[in-house]
Amino acid sequence: MPLSQLSARTSFENNPKLAKQSHLLQSLLKAISEKQIPEEQASSINEIISGINNFSGPDPELLKVMKAGQAAILKLLEKELKIVPQNHYQTLWMVLGMSAFGLPLGVAFGAALGNMAFLAIGLPIGMSIGIALGNGMDTKAKNEGRQLEWKAS
């Protein structure tokens, strides 16, 4: 089943934020169409796109709907097909590394040195650990063919 495309609007030309978001969403749909996805997920994505195409509200609300649609599509792909965009795990694990590894290490440094000002030392250490773990998971996803050729930037 072919994926629906985002319908062009005149507000895309007038509003640079809408133009950028529409370009991101169109490039996401193009990257998804290069993968072979099952009919069930393709129809779900088409429903999301038709909801965006049928939206008739003001531009700021349209921007919110487009961002929510993009997030819903990415969540659907990740949960049901284990397909993720580039650097997904790296971004996710950077934050987790800072909170799960960095803060406890910072508290340990602060307690050992008797000055809780050293709490911040653990954050870059945890961030490095998280980036390394996430990068490994991204490489694994790419090798298994579960990575979209799309960046959310």
Image (spheres, grey):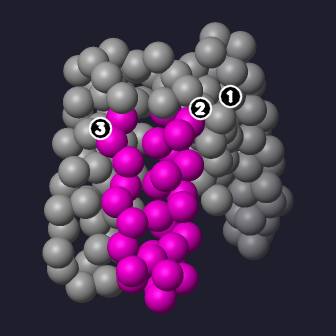
Q: Residue furthest top?
A: 144
Query: Looking at the image, which residue is at 47% across and 88% down?
Result: 14
Contact between marks 2 and 1 (CB within 8 A): the answer is: no
61 or 117, which is in the foreground?
A: 61
Side of 91 where 40 appears, left or right: left
83 or 42, which is in the foreground?
A: 42
Residue 106 marker = none
Q: Which residue is mark 3?
A: 45
Query: On the image, which quarter does residue 122 sit in?
Result: bottom right
Quarter of the rendering occupied by the C terminus: bottom right
Side of 117 where 32 appears, left or right: left
Quick one: label 2 or label 3, which is nearer the N terminus?
Answer: 3
Query: At numbered mark 2, what does the secondary structure look like: helix, strand or loop?
Result: loop
Query: On the image, which quarter does residue 37 sit in?
Result: top left
**Percent position (x, y) of residue 134?**
68, 34
Label 3 environment density (alpha carbons within 10 Å; few <14, some 14–19, many ≥20) = many
Query: Looking at the image, which residue is at 36% across and 29% down?
Result: 2
Quick one: label 2 or label 1, which is nearer the N terminus?
Answer: 1
Distance between mark 3 and mark 1 Cα atoms = 24 Å
Residue 148 marker = 2
Residue type beneath disc 2: Leu
**Percent position (x, y) of residue 8?**
39, 66
Residue type beneath disc 3: Ile
Q: Nearer the viewer, mark 3 or mark 1?
A: 3
Distance between mark 2 and mark 3 Cα atoms = 15 Å
